[in-house]
Amino acid sequence: MPRSRLPLILLFLLPVIGLAVLVYYLVAALDPARDPNRVATVMIDQPVPSFALPPLDGERPGLANTDLDGVVLINFFASWCIPCRVEHPLLTELAKSGVVIHGIAYKDKPEDARAWLNELGNPYTRIGADSNGRVAIDFGVYGVPETYVVDRQGRIRFRQVGPFDPTTIEETLKPLLRELRQ
Amino acid sequence: MIPELGHFALVLAFVVALAQSSLPMLGAARGDRRLMAVAGPAALAQLLLLAVSFGALTYAFVVSDFSVALVVAHSHSAKPLLYKISGVWANHEGSLLLWVNMLALFGAAVALFGSNLPPALKARVLAVQGMIAVGFHAFMLFTSNPFLRVFPVPADGNDLNPILQDPGLAFHPPMLYLGYVGFSMAFSFAVAALIEGKVDAAWARWVRPWTLAAWVTLTLGIGLGARWAYYELGWGGWWFWDPVENASLMPWLAGTALLHSAIVVEKRDTLKSWTILLAILTFGLSLLGTFLVRSGVLTSVHTFASDPARGLFILGLFAAAVGGSLTLYAVRAPALKGGGLFQPISREGALLLNNLLLATACATVFIGTLYPLFLDGIGGATVSVGPPYYNTTFMPLLAALVFVTGIGPMLAWKRGDLAAVLSRLTLAGVGAVAAALVAWRLETQGPILAVAGIGFAFWLLLATLIDLAGRFGLGRGRPAEIWRRAVGLPRSAWGGALAHAGLAVALLGMVGTTLWAAENIRVMRPGETTTLGGYDYRFDGTEQVSGPNYSSDFGRFTVSRGGAVVAVLTPEKRFYPVQGTPTTEAAIKTTAAADLYVVLGDPDGQGGWTVRVFHRPLAMWLWLGFVMMSAGGAVSLSDRRLRVGAPARRGLAAVAARPA
Amino acid sequence: MTARRYGVVIGFMLWLAATGAGAVEPNEMLADPVLEARARDLSREIRCLVCQNQAIDDSNADLARDLRLLLRERLVAGDSDEQAKQFLVARYGDFVLLRPPLKPRTYALWFGPAVVLVLGAFGTALYMRRRRPRVAPPPLDAAERHRLDEILAEGSDAP
């Protein structure tokens, strides 16, 4: 083929090449693990925002960032949230195994949250009542449940959007907690 | 029984499509007339079978046959008949059945009305249509079967989303699909031409009617969707740059470019390989749109239920169709020899500029829509691309396009005299500036962009009228002669002028409704009055009413201006018990100057209601513009010369009146 | 009228001129029309995170309402438009902005259309130049010129 033809052939091949690139990214986008609605967190490695929430009732004290000591979980929940119910037994188990979990009741009436915890059990060491949702916004929460792992220096190291499942707990959470405790 | 018949017909259609896609192609390669002759009857048989299939599904919906899973999921016995019928295509599987019916409809049309096509070309075109059909039939039969049954049969269905129970929305998908599928004809013609290795003026003339028909219906489909959003969503917004909306805009932009470049191929035998590429890309964008809507890769209010397996299948179809044709293009297109030469300043040059602007606009929407996906793919945080992005990038292109469209049609072929054209357009320029000044005086609070927009719109409108008047020599000779020349003007000239004027009129509406809109949101008690845009709105109270499958609160507002009552508006707040969703029905009074738009919000529990009043200037012109554009395309379509492929026998006087 | 009153009147007119959208409730709106107009404009640029592609100005969702109220609080506290937006970006990332910020990650997004236009124009110009015939026809030699003169002379004798 004459040399002067080569750039022309390449030019005409550009659309196909462009298509291949496009299809590559579309295939990547089809990955079931990808959720276009998921909001990535910018809080990883950031210090926990400062907050001070009143208690839910007389039983457990309220929660402030100054109360955080050691490696802890902060779990945003609500009595009106169905997936929170699904994740609850897993949290109870974690609490029993020695993990400190603090709860924040997100936009919940105190009596509803209390009733919910009475019914399902209470895995939380401390509970804050975030009735207007402002503290949640400071964390970058956009739905419940969401859980944050905070290390000894008070930095956020992990965020779980949506309810926990056993696989995530075994394969991601527990190894992380072990690592942070060393 | 009937659903089984429908299912069987679908399977048969699949088999016919297999035959249609292979035998005629083989026949054309060998010059075997009998094999080529399979194409026509196969296309007709496919249409017949698919019509039976679609009819069966419609029957199942109409009689509420809840043994069909689709009917259970998307219908309810209490739904009005119209929405039972439109429920057939308001879901993923049913809409696919509609899609393939449209595909078969176009194929059958070519089989019946394409008698002037050379047999080999016709065979190849229908074969490519058959290939597309094979892909979609397989998609339906293997992943999205509309005829799946359910047992035990439930007592009733799960009502259709009440927001979709609307006449405008009932016809929005069929129009859109006619458009998307219509572009498949241009695609088939392009691929057939590449296989034959020949693109000439005759080819362009054959392609044009199909492309035009697709364009007209797509314009109407987009317009219907925008109009529906305008009155249903409750605040008069009509375009949100949502990914699925963009998915319909991209083929529209490419299709508009295709229409115009096909003119150059026909008239001057040049720009061939670019036009072929456009034909492939336009349909490719239709397929991409289908993928984006049904695969769940992008966030959108419009998406059907998402399923990665289905997404992968459509992506495969897309990659095969577009990849195959683009590869064929890379191999065959370099051999296409160009014809006429032309100066940069000429009709061809203007059409080339038109294509450049439209292609860039299309690329802009493409980049914006897919960028979040791309960022996801390379890892790291993603961004949101919303209306602010498109306003910055798309609008300048639109403005440039509107400006050039005023000048282009007046330039001569081969070599145009820009100075002469501009001097003829002085009146348009003066008119545009005058209109802008008037707009500025009337709406001194509005953004400067609105004034510019009005100016551009009037420029195009006046330029189009001047061009039209020049074509039939308005002002030269006696009225009878002028009339004769006007009537003798080819319909494509009238159609083009109407469509361009429609763009200008639509632009007026776009500027008014978005840049000059005003609103008044407050809590009102019965008897109170509020004002907006020079009108007084008195809230007269509410009453409760029951509809076939909903209950509603009707509000009553008396609107007056300067003491005289202009209208009584009755917005509603409806509640649909089965799905448990509330909707608002806005009340709109349309005047030439503005739409008066009232929405009833929530009660405050103390006898007051939240009321939203909107003032949307020039709204009517937006919809009129859409209609004018579609009508212009339809008028052009009715031009016999374009369909039959031979110049009509007209008086020499009419021919002489046209500029060179 | 005092300057402040003027400000309120003009602000009120500006507020009326703001383009409309549907979800703001009367009990959210600020008393100061200028701030309210700013809040509305900002709300149109903030994404509702629990919706499908809507601005918080257009959405009925709870979180959208919370964010609208939060924006108004920030404005009342004296934040500039940019500061208020950054307040949200610090918590939710760039994703919350409907106008993507200009940073290296988004250069292709913002400059892409212009690049396409320039490349397209360049390509078109190249195409136009290649189409023009490159070689001028060779000049006539003496014999051909003579023949041409003869032909032209014949033509002028024609009746």
Image (tube, grey):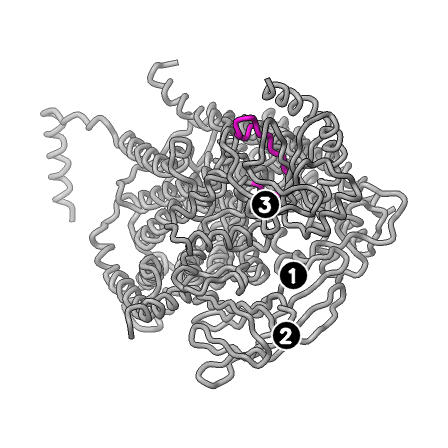
Residue position marked by numbered label 1 in the rendering: B583
C138 with respect to B528 (left or right): left
- Depth check, mark 3 against mark 1: the one in front is 3
* Mark 2 in CB contact with mark 1 (< 8 angstroms): no
Residue position marked by numbered label 2 in the rendering: B607
Q: Does residue B516 belong to the magenta stretch?
A: no
Q: Which span of residues is magenta-colored?
A: A141-157
Of all chains, the one bearing label 3 is A
Q: Secondary structure at mark 1?
A: strand
C114 with respect to B108 (left or right): left
Residue position marked by numbered label 3 in the rendering: A53
Q: Residue furthest bottom?
A: B563
**Residue B540 lies in quadrant:** bottom right
B191 with respect to B168 (left or right): left
How many marks overall?
Answer: 3
Say which of A144 and B540 sits in front: A144
Residue at image location 54% in from the left, 79% down from the top: B528
The amino acid at mark 1 is Thr
- Depth check, mark 3 against mark 2: the one in front is 3
Measured along the vertical axis of the image, is residue B339 above or below residue B102?
Answer: above
The amino acid at mark 3 is Leu
